[in-house]
Amino acid sequence: MSSVRLQSGSEKLASAPLGQSIKDFLNYVIVEAGLSNNTVLAYGRDLKGFLAYCNSKKINCLQQIKPVHIQKYMQVLSRAEKSESTVKRCLVAIRMLLRFSKLTGRICDDFTSILEGPKLWQKLPTYCSKKQVIDLLNAPLPDEPFYLRDKAILELLYATGVRASELAGLKTSDLNLNIGYLRCLGKGNRERVIPIGKVAIAATIEYLRDLRPKLAKSHSTDFLLLSRTGLPLSRIEIWRLVKKYAIRAGLPRKLTAHTLRHCFATHLLTGGADLRSVQEMLGHVDIATTQIYTHVDQERLRKIHKTYHPRP
């Protein structure tokens, strides 16, 4: 009797509307998989587009999806001039949806292994010279109302290499300015501890002492960075602030908060830091992700070649 109930339950899941199956998958990755909010939102957007395509082809449930449908959708994205990284991420989202569906008995066959994604060239990260970074850090003006907060934001981004989302999520209890480190949660809720330099410590102390108490309201929480209304600053607001000061400093418009993360890693390696230490501070699971920064320091490579090659 129980096997009959199980079978009927699986059949019910298999015949569920595709939109409902996608909702169930997204709930799964939020609750069980521990993916970051940004990743979940990106997968949601990718699968929303895939759902619209399936609806246009009269594909109503998971069992009707075939490899050819996914391949044709990838072609649709390419013709729409989506970047290779966007197409690849969309394919990853669809693969995860199908694997989840196989795991939960919604489909019998998992054909994700035969799906090929676009071949990506490894793009070197954009970074700035040390002088350009200094110009950016000096862009906030002392007579501006949020000078202390914005100065602390820029200094912390460059001093620690944290992502904008990680900085937005910092609470005052995550800082130990006496010893000089912060604790943050990265992708997959992985915790790491990162040292803070003296300049960033001084800027943060000044902000905590002279401005944050004025921004804090009754509804404010323990978050480190607050807006003028007393609410925590969002990742998007931090990106906008960095963009604002980059333009003021005369730096390229494509410079973002993530560029300071690239600068942090590149300048550390230029100064002689070992790759493992940089990997740990950046929170990379695979050291291959960190190794890309060794390719951008051309001057260092030239010096190594000149010093050690028998015929420089």
Image: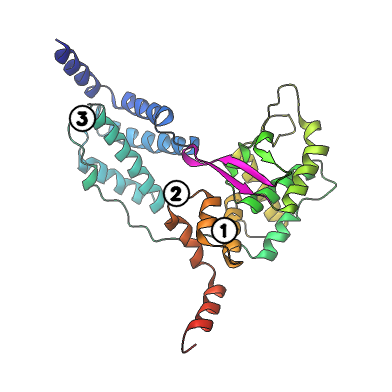
Nearest the camera: 271 or 11?
271
Which quadrant of the structure image shows residue 268? bottom right
Give 201 or 245, whichever is nearer the viewer.
Answer: 201
**CA neighbours of label 3 inside 10 A, class few (<14), some (14 to 19), many (20+):** many
Against 134, residue 235 (above or below) is above
The residue at which mark 1 appears reads as 265
Magenta stretch, residue numbers: 180-196
Element type at mark 2: loop
**Residue type of the residue flagged with mark 1:** Ala
Distance between mark 2 and mark 3 Cα atoms: 32 Å
Q: Amino acid at mark 3?
A: Ile
Q: CA distance from mark 1 to mark 2?
A: 15 Å
Residue 193 located within the stretch drawn in magenta: yes
The single residue placed furthest to the right in the displayed view is 143
Q: Which mark is residue 285?
A: 2
Residue 234 in picture, x, y percent from top left: 62, 36
Residue drawn 49% across the image and 37% down it: 189
Instruction: Indicate which label's residue lies in the foreground, 3 or 1.
Output: 1
Decide whether residue 240 is among the magenta residues: no
Nearest the eye: 308 or 87: 308
Residue 306, relative to residue 212: is it above or below?
Answer: below
